[in-house]
């Protein structure tokens, strides 16, 4: 069979790194079948183009997987495929797991899927393929249960994605960079042709059960990890490939809560150091786990750059209502300062419309944010995802205004009646925060902080580029004119960067007069001895501070 695995558009931005699941399912597909992957966020396809692709390439089976916000887009594509071809469609992923009857047409809407896979598909997918090949697809596939409990994949013998055989161009962020910006980057000493952002998972599950989150019910409370060796092998392969293509590799560890077992994460990071498998990486870690100095040292030394942390609110009452009161707003500043000490910065995620939020929540939040080291704040509205405790509570109290909001997807629009402010007010609070935190003054303030704190040019550039990209989540920058306008607005910060970059280049040339660029030393730093020392030595601190560089 020819199988097409398709990720629908996320309706936000095209400059996204492709999702991991199709690459994993490709590896899990039994021999003898051809698999093609199309991620609509990396390569946009209209419904017409997708149908034409399916017909021209004689696709026999389409697999689609998506989050709730992509459901409408997925169903639109599926409707077109069903109308014009006899090809079977299998759907899976978080949204389908939450409402499996919906794509099967059992909830009063048209049918979009011939079969659905509920939950993790690592063990069910081969069966789906075998059944499809025999034209014997069942309607629902799900993991086995024992005593009423789901038997989840162990992640032992995790199948490493065949990265060598894939077209890495899909993961190359440089393809979005216009030639004149590439030239400027080269002038400033950024000597890579490609920048690959690759998703890697090292474990699944989170026991915390925050009220709005789907993870605990999807992946379970039981945390499962891949072996360190298995992860290291993948990192080493990726590193070698990136080097071959003169590429900078950036790994996004997609684990829900990368440090949920701190001892295990420390052991993985130590092994990365030991085996020269350090790469610049980003991961998601909850705030309560980031006060551990030894962990921060290891994160920094192994290449950690940005940590995505769900702060959600600066209001303890809201956090309590959301069952996330392990987050302590009083501690945020100290934790973020602790990160910055090791040149680690946070993508701080906030949710507005929470139970104790009132008009002015944006002002209160951004005032706090302004006292922290620069990061990348992101703001969203509380969203009742189906099958979460939040959804059930709001539905039971008659507060859902759009109970099937995903079928009428509107970004940053409330789907429920918030308690302390109106839906319109909540949306305005979101706009206020995005506008303020990504205004030219915010770019200038971040640059000023980095200069005052003697952060190298690499960090300055990293912050600037990341801030530009994150701004696009709320203010889509989809054409050349939008980019020119944005760069012009930030000419002050760009001027400061060019001056620092030029100085850094001169310094480098003085230090290495024969070489065009600095020798490509690994971002790995030796493990401090003894690793468990209470206080890092001065030499170690210095190495962490000076040794980390971008590019
Ligand atoms: C990484 C990640 C992101 C990345 C995505 C980039 C990338 N390239 O991966 C980023 C940070 C950008 C992101 C953003 C968002 N995310 Co996110 N994200 C994740 C995360 C942590 C990991 C996804 C992952 O790769 N998992 C590992 C793979 C292997 O698991 P999987 O995708 O679930 O696939 C398995 C099964 O689902 C199944 N499967 C999946 N698809 C298919 C298809 C078929 C045909 C079959 C048979 C099986 C199948 O098989 C796989 C193997 O078992 C998940 C949580 C989680 N742990 O899954 C949240 C998660 C998917 N995100 C979520 C949300 C809400 C968001 C945001 C909307 C948050 C926000 N408010 O802005 C944004 C929106 C993004 C967008 N615009 O599209 C929710 C989705 C809930 C829902 N019902 O929709 C999740 C589940 C987390 C949560 N808190 O509940 N996210
Ligand atoms: S800590 Fe994060 S992943 Fe875990 S339940 Fe809460 S929001 Fe979800």
Image (cartoon, rainbow, N blue to C red):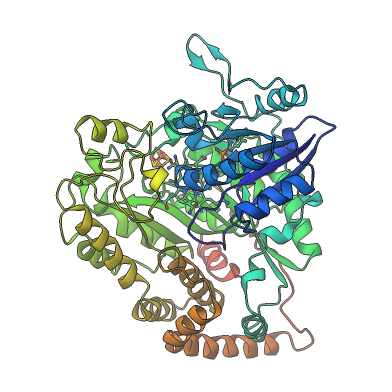
Where's residue 388, x and y in %?
Answer: 36, 33
Residue 551 seen in this snapshot = no
> Does residue 285 lie above or below 469 as drawn?
above
Residue 313 seen in this snapshot = yes
Locate residue 76 relative to residue 331 in the image: left or right: right
Residue at the farthest front position: 84
Locate residue 140 relative to residue 149 in the image: left or right: right
**Which quadrant of the figure has residue 40?**
bottom right
Please count the marks in the image.
0
Where's residue 83, x and y in %?
Answer: 61, 40
Q: 9 or 337: nearer the eye?
A: 9
Tell me the quarter of the image containing the C terminus: bottom right
Measuring 34% from the left and 51% from the top, which residue is drawn there? 311
Where's residue 542, x and y in %?
Answer: 53, 68
> Does residue 108 lie above or below 278 as drawn?
above
Where's residue 458, x and y in %?
Answer: 56, 75
Measuring 62% from the left and 29% from the top, which residue is drawn there? 121
Tell me the quarter of the image containing the N terminus: top right
Q: 444 or 501: nearer the eye?
A: 444
Residue at the farthest top position: 147
């Amino acid at each position: 069979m020819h199988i097409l695995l398709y990720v629908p558009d996320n309706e936000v931005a095209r400059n996204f790194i492709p999702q991991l699941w199709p690459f994993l399912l490709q590896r899990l597909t039994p021999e003898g079948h051809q698999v093609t992957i199309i991620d609509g966020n990396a390569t946009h396809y209209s419904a017409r183009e997708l149908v034409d692709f399916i017909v021209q390439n004689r696709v026999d089976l389409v697999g689609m997987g998506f989050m709730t916000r992509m459901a409408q887009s997925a169903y639109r594509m599926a409707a077109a495929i069903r109308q014009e071809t006899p090809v079977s469609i299998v759907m899976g992923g978080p949204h389908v797991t939450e409402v499996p009857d919906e794509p099967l047409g059992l909830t009063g809407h048209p049918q979009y899927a011939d079969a659905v896979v509920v939950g993790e598909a690592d063990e069910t997918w081969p069966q789906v393929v075998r059944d499809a090949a025999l034209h014997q697809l069942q309607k629902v596939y799900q993991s086995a249960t024992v005593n009423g409990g789901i038997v989840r994949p162990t992640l032992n013998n995790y199948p490493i994605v065949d990265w060598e055989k894939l077209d890495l161009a899909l993961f190359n962020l440089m393809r979005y960079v216009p030639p004149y910006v590439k030239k400027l980057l080269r002038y400033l000493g950024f000597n890579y042709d490609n920048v690959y952002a690759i998703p890697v998972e090292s474990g699944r599950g989170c026991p915390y059960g925050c009220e709005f989150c789907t993870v605990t019910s999807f992946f379970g409370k039981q945390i499962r990890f891949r072996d360190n060796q298995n992860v290291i092998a993948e990192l080493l392969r990726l590193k070698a490939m990136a080097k071959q293509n003169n590429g900078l590799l950036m790994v996004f560890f997609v684990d829900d809560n990368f440090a949920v077992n701190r001892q295990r994460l420390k052991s993985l990071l130590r092994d990365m150091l030991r085996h020269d498998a350090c790469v610049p990486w980003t991961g998601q870690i909850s705030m309560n786990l980031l006060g551990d100095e030894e962990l921060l040292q290891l994160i920094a030394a192994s290449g950690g750059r940005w940590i995505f942390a769900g702060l959600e609110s600066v209001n303890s009452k809201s956090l309590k209502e959301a069952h996330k009161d392990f987050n302590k707003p009083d501690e945020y500043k100290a934790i973020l300062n602790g990160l910055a000490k090791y040149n680690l910065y946070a993508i701080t995620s906030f949710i507005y419309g929470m139970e104790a939020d009132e008009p002015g929540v944006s002002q209160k939040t951004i005032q706090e944010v302004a006292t922290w080291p620069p990061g990348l704040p992101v703001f969203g509205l509380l969203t009742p995802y189906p099958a979460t405790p939040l959804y059930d509570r709001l539905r039971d109290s008659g507060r859902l205004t759009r109970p099937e909001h995903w079928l009428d997807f509107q970004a940053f629009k409330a789907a429920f009646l918030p308690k302390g402010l109106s839906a319109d007010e909540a949306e305005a609070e979101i706009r206020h925060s995005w506008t303020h935190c990504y205004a030219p003054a915010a770019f200038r303030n971040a640059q000023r902080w980095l200069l005052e704190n003697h952060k190298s040019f690499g960090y300055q550039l990293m912050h600037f580029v990341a801030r530009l990209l994150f701004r696009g989540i709320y203010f889509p920058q989809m054409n050349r004119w939008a980019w020119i306008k944005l760069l012009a607005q930030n000419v002050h910060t760009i001027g400061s960067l060019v001056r620092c970059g030029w100085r850094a280049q001169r310094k480098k040339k003085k230090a290495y007069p024969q070489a065009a660029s600095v020798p490509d030393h690994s971002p790995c730093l030796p493990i401090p001895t003894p690793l468990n020392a209470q206080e890092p030595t001065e030499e170690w601190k210095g190495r962490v501070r000076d040794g980390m560089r971008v590019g």
